[in-house]
Amino acid sequence: MLEARLVQGSLMKKVMEAIKDLIDIGNFEFSSTGFMLTDMDPNRFSVMEFFLHSAGFDHYHCDRNLSFAMNLHNLAKILNCAADDDILTIQAQGDGLAADSITFTLESPNQDKVSKFEMKVKKIDSQQFGIPRTKYQAIFRMPSSEFARICMDLSNIADTVISVTKEAVKFSARGDIRAATIACMPNTDVDKVEEATLIAVDEPVGLTFALKYMSLFTKATPLADQVTISLSSDQPAVVEYKMAEMGHIRFYLAPKIEEMNTEPLGENEDEMETEPQAESNPPVDTKAKIELWELTSFD
Amino acid sequence: MLEARLVQGSLMKKVMEAIKDLIDIGNFEFSSTGFMLTDMDPNRFSVMEFFLHSAGFDHYHCDRNLSFAMNLHNLAKILNCAADDDILTIQAQGDGLAADSITFTLESPNQDKVSKFEMKVKKIDSQQFGIPRTKYQAIFRMPSSEFARICMDLSNIADTVISVTKEAVKFSARGDIRAATIACMPNTDVDKVEEATLIAVDEPVGLTFALKYMSLFTKATPLADQVTISLSSDQPAVVEYKMAEMGHIRFYLAPKIEEMNTEPLGENEDEMETEPQAESNPPVDTKAKIELWELTSFD
Amino acid sequence: MLEARLVQGSLMKKVMEAIKDLIDIGNFEFSSTGFMLTDMDPNRFSVMEFFLHSAGFDHYHCDRNLSFAMNLHNLAKILNCAADDDILTIQAQGDGLAADSITFTLESPNQDKVSKFEMKVKKIDSQQFGIPRTKYQAIFRMPSSEFARICMDLSNIADTVISVTKEAVKFSARGDIRAATIACMPNTDVDKVEEATLIAVDEPVGLTFALKYMSLFTKATPLADQVTISLSSDQPAVVEYKMAEMGHIRFYLAPKIEEMNTEPLGENEDEMETEPQAESNPPVDTKAKIELWELTSFD
């Protein structure tokens, strides 16, 4: 039996808004430690992981692990019915393995409106995507709104190189008739701590990513003031939005391997500041990496 | 000759916004008692009736009944030109029966801008839809924004059963993979009178309606803080937005007759709270009802 | 070598928003007096001219005239990356004639973000559209937002006659089933000077314009509180948005020649106030005028 009550029910609504364009069917897993929602995007380039601690709920009772798959668009429609101050309760009756429908209840604070939604679900075995946890070469943290802005600004040009040195994080894109470099320098001299930009580098790193995915990740911007991005030349990048003590949403994205365009854009090539990929970073074979994930993604 | 002046000209703009998606050509009728605009939707499931008392106008002179049909989309475009504080004057010169164009004048309060629009109209005979007025089994009144919200929330699931008992108004919808019940309890313990929910029941009633129409009716939400819905098992429902002393906009909607889906959604059927249609309410033959309307709709 | 720095970088963003729907490829010309951007719309009915004084820049150095063509949609995308308080620097290295790429740099005020964009450009010879400057029969100035509103309100009816007398500026349009006249009277009794409407008439004038172009011009509304429109029966109209001491954006539009629709709309024709074109204003041959422009448009 599962009963999980979240007074701040609108949190779950924001999470669904953040991920529903990235994945169709999510894997839901309730256990004694909390609620985990994961999926790989249909093209197998990225993995999303949302986790909410059991302590993040106002009431949480789960006497048996419960795993099921659910269409996230349908769930988003249900959660969109939540008013800002509605209380959300998620329930599954009986033996977890037998449950094939889940009930979501939204209650107004003064109890004069109660909305109950029942959703059919598909039972599945527990799934874990085996993301190897390693030490990263470079990590930076910046305002999540600033990261979203940069992804939007570069979205019309080309895939983006992210390169990190102690001095700056540089986002570079080079198209046929345009090229752009946006440099963000460390900055802790700010009015509010969430406006800071921090950079920690063991070894400089430069990797190319499909900007389309990064842009989709930035839909999580309303969930956290800051975003933390961890990069290593032989690992998927981790883009993490941490929700205070409650949990987190993490996106993993495999870097692209491609012939770097090192042709000059025009005659004044030395004007441009596109960073060439550091030679110490051998290209990652995206295809191989995804297959590695697949091998490790079922326990 | 007709001359009707409305200082609060933006009211008419709101009315057009409320109804222009429901009907194409409206029947306009000016008489000494006021202005009535009616139409049946093209599928003949619903009837709309907007009425503005002659006393609701700031100046009203109509020495002969005037009936004409006008394209509401075109009229909405004209009225969209009205600034919030513009004064609207509607004029038809000469004998009402001869008029084939109507002039709408918008004046800014300080008279530095005057916009005059002339519209061709089609003369018609006076029409009345013969809606039988009877005592209803159940009536409820609730905040119009709350009713709009419920219609929106259920709009993706299925047609909706509205059932009213003394304890609650319940809106239920049951689709293939989702089911929902939203219950609104009477509540007069509110800060503002327009936030109250009131229920008056002679006999409990449960009827199924095409949610699409209810959703279209809720475009009238900006016209009134509260909506009043009257139900009887052998009558079209009445959805009324009352504009203080000025007039009202009423929508009439025939209930649907359909095999109620009483199949369980999943194995935990007793979890669901979908109300079965009360057995004392024999199904209404929608088709028959509409024909009854047609017979009585022309004087 | 060119280096032009504009602390109020968002100004250029607003200019691009104002003109990017009107023209595709703009002619850019930097000289010691400032920056001029011109183009004729693809249909050759209108000419746009944006000018920014060298003194309007915070730093301006241009040691040789520089002329090039650039796709305005691409430039708008770059300038959309500018935050409201970003500083814009435009640079071209080396001999102006050899430059085939231009660099746009956006810097945040506290220097913690620097975005650099390089754009390929096409070198062209200097171009000037030979707009003859003459005395106009009638000039009026009104709030730019009011002019935009009128263009929008009339946009669904037909091309528009603008007629100016000492008493009023009248905008009239006459479609098959609708006709409209909007009259604006001189008004200097206003709280703020930018709300005034002024009219100066040597000789009354009435001309017909393609409303589509006027509507496109009104995208410049955010650049200036007032718009000044100059009319003569044998000249293109000038629609000017003046940006204080910095510069201006001017649109030139050839009047249309067409058979004025003088048929009554209905039986109550005398109700309508459509101004017949003043007989002292012979129709202008649009085609001929445009050819005149073409002959004079290259130095």
Image (tube, coloured by chain):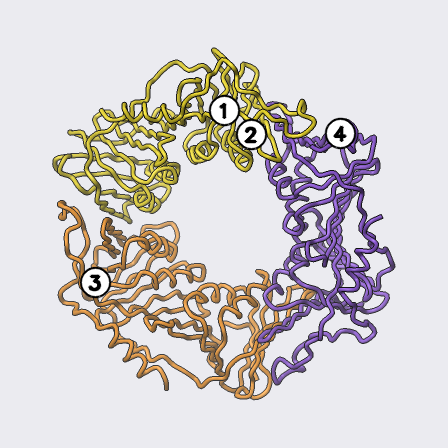
Chain colours: A purple, B yellow, C orange
Q: Which of the 4 quarters of the picture holds residue B266?
A: top right
The Cα atoms of the two marked residues, 4 and 3, are separated by 75 Å
Q: Nearer the viewer, mark 2 or mark 3?
A: 2
Mark nearer the N terminus (2 vs 1): 1
For the residues labelled 1 and 3, say whether their Cβ atoms are less than 8 Å apart.
no
Q: Amino acid at mark 3?
A: Gly
Q: Which of the 4 quarters of the picture holds residue B39?
A: top left
For the residues labelled 4 and 3, say whether their Cβ atoms are less than 8 Å apart.
no
Is C248 or B160 nearer to us in this picture?
Answer: B160
Residue under numbered circle 3: C206
The Cα atoms of the two marked residues, 1 and 4, are separated by 31 Å
Residue under numbered circle 2: B173
Quadrant of image for the C terminus of chain B: top left
Q: Nearer the viewer, mark 1 or mark 3?
A: 1
Q: Chain of mark 3?
A: C
Seen at 83% across and 54% down, the residue is A296
Residue under numbered circle 1: B142
| Residue that sits furthest to the top in the current view | B202
> Residue A18: where, in percent of width, then height?
66, 48
Label 3 residue SS: strand
> Residue A277: where, in percent of width, then height?
76, 73
Q: Nearer the viewer, mark 4 or mark 3?
A: 4
Residue under numbered circle 4: A3
* Residue B33 appears in the picture as rendered: yes
Q: Amino acid at mark 2?
A: Ala
Q: Amino acid at mark 4?
A: Glu
Q: Chain of mark 2?
A: B
Left or right: where C17 falls relative to C198: right
Is C10 or A218 nearer to us in this picture?
Answer: A218
Left or right: where B24 falls relative to B193: left
